[in-house]
Structures are given as structure tokens and as C-alpha cells.
Amino acid sequence: MTEALDAQTLFSGVVKAEGADALNEANLTAWMQDNVAGFEGPIEVFKFAGGQSNPTYRINATSGSYVLRRKPFGQLLPSAHAVDREFKVINGLYPTGFPVARPYGLCTDESVIGSWFYIMAMVEGRTIWDGAMPGATPEFRRQTYFAMIDTLAALHNTDVAAAGLSDYGKPGNYFGRQVDRWTKQYRLSETEQMPVMERLIEWLPATLPEQTRTSVVHGDYRIDNMIFAADSPQVVAVLDWELSTLGDPLADFTYVAMAWVTDNAGRSGVQDLDRKALGIPELDEAVARYCQAAGRDGVPDMNWYFAYNFFRLAGIIQGIKKRVIDGTANSAHAKEMSERVSPLAEAAWAFAVKAGA
């Protein structure tokens, strides 16, 4: 059993950007003057406490508040930390009315602050780190979960061509490409032999499900990767598009559904909560809500998808573990995160067995 985290305290808020997290404020100010519409300095730079991958900053300026997302400094795994792709998808979705922050500009000149970055508007509201939503009423919780699901369906219903995202990924064989990608990433960050990961690496590509739809896929869609309105169950901005691409929308939905097969421990899981008392929908209600909003007749058995999602998470956390060892991890919480690789892999295999392995 994972020890419960007070994630709301652990990940919320900002700290002064100092030491290794400090940015060249003079260079950044000059770049924003040239590239951010309506910008007026001077600036004050703070780093958000949450997040494990791309360092994220709040920039307070005379003209308002902005968010900067940058690649980590140092040696990086190939295809990881693609802030240029994050910017491209936000830039495509924003004009469609889908809830994302307004994008202002992308910088690929490392001489400015030492890594690629982009600037977007600061969206004010609530971030929910704990799926139990302490302090909320049952009806407010229920409507919050439905808003999260409806917003995901809206993403999957977005006209890819109209958003200028037809070239954002390859059509078809999404899960095959993803299993290959995360296997390669795992190999690049492997620190010890794990027999259960080897079994998954052999089984997953041999049992790929058929892909029947293609849409923009967020890749990390869960309750703590969005901003809700301050006083209503409405999603005002979906965040953290680093893993987004064109793919099978079931990847996103089954990733959301993992909350129902994951214990809470202060995070997004709801498996061990009294969902009825809290007002949190049951998984079959979440499925029905998504299918209605996305125009689907139903979803297939989810055990293969759960196995894949837990495998992918194990691969991602293995990357964090490697960065902890190398000394380049982005968060003080990263070391504790890195100890989750084995339990995630075991969970993946348990679902693989349920799927027929």
C-alpha cells in the first residue's frame, strides 16, 4: 500500500526560481518583448512545485501573468520533453474553443535561457491533485468528474484537419507504435533487469487491439492535469500536452479509467474510496457518459488497455528513476516516485493475465 500523500500541499504553489532552476531574466525579458503580444516588463520568475518532466514557471509581468514551459537542462532521452509539440497542439486547439491556455510563442534558440521553451497565458482556477476532492459536496464531485469526461470527449471529437493538426502524428497502429516507443525509452533508462517488464515487452506487441478511430490523444489525461473554474465544475484549461499525438482515443479514456483500478493514496485514484458516499461516478457511469458524448456504442474490455497504460507508466517512471541516479530529475519528489516502477510493472502484468496472458 502506497503511503498517502498530501499532494495538494506537495505539488501546489510556486517557489522563487533559484540556483539550478534560475532563468536568465534579462534574456527572457528581451525575447518576450519581441515575441509576446502585449507584453510589458519587468518580470518576476517563480517555479511551480508540481510536475516531474518539463519544468514550469510562472512569469509575473506588468502586462499580466504568463506560464513558461521549458525542456530540462542536461542530457535528455530522444523524443522526450518535446515542448515544441506541446506548443503546436495548444496553438492548433486554442482557436477551436477547446479549453487550453492562450499560446504566445515558442523559442528554439537555446542561447536565450539554455533550453527550448514556450510561453502561454496563465489560467487562474483550481488544480485538483486528490481524486477524493476533500471538502467538496457529493454533487459537486460528480459534476466535476463528468466535466472531465465531457472535455475528453470534446477533444476526441475535434476536427484534426480544421485544427491544423493532420501532421501531428501517424495514422493507424497507435498502440503498436506506443509499445515500441515505451519499450525503447525503457531500454534507454534501464537500471536493472526486471523479468515482469520483459514479459510485458514480449506480450503487448503480440496482442495489439484493433484501432477503429483516430483523434488528438492527450496522453496524460487525468484530473490533476487540468485547471477547473474557481467555483464551478468546469474545465477551463487542459495542461501538460507533452505526450500528445494523433492516435486511438481509447488510450486516453482507459488512462482516465485507471483511476477506478488504482487506490487513492492522496492522488487521482478512486478504487478504495466510498464512491457512492462521495458522489464519484462508478466506472460504468463514466463509460456511459464518455460514450454518449463521444458518439460510441461502447468500449471494449479494458484489461489489455490497463496493462498497456501501467506498462507505459512504469516506463515513464523508469525514466525519472534514471534521472534521479544521473542527478537531473526535476522534482524533490522524484526519488519517491522512482520507487514505483516495480509495483506499476506488476500491476500491468496482473491486467495482462486478466486479458488472457
Image: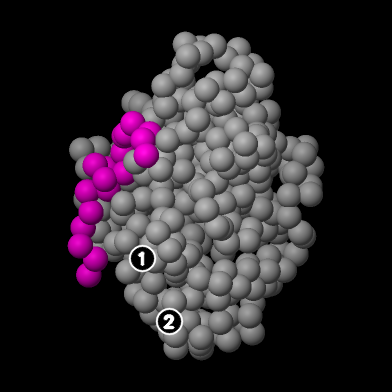
> Which of pointers 2 and 1 lies earlier in the amino acid sequence?
2
* Residue range of the region highlighted in magenta in the rendering: 1-19
Location of residue 27 in the rendering, given as x and y in whole percent from the top left corner: 56, 26
Q: Quadrant of the N terminus?
A: bottom left
Q: Which is nearer the eye, 217 or 46?
A: 46
Whether residue 260 is situated above or below residue 245 in the rendered picture: below
Q: Amino acid at mark 1?
A: Ser
**Residue 128 at least partly seen:** no
Q: By what rule are the colours in the image chosen? A: one colour
CA neighbours of label 2 inside 10 A, class few (<14), some (14 to 19), many (20+)? few
Q: Nearer the viewer, residue 51 or 18?
A: 18
Q: Residues within 10 Å of mark 1 (few under 14, many from 20)?
A: many
Residue 272, percent from left and from top: 25, 63
Looking at the rendered structure, the secondary structure element under dot 2 is loop
Magenta-span inclusion, residue 319:
no
Q: Could you say which disc has been placed on residue 338 in the image?
A: 1
Image position of 330 (left or right of 26): left
Q: How many marks?
A: 2
Quadrant in which residue 271 is drawn: bottom left
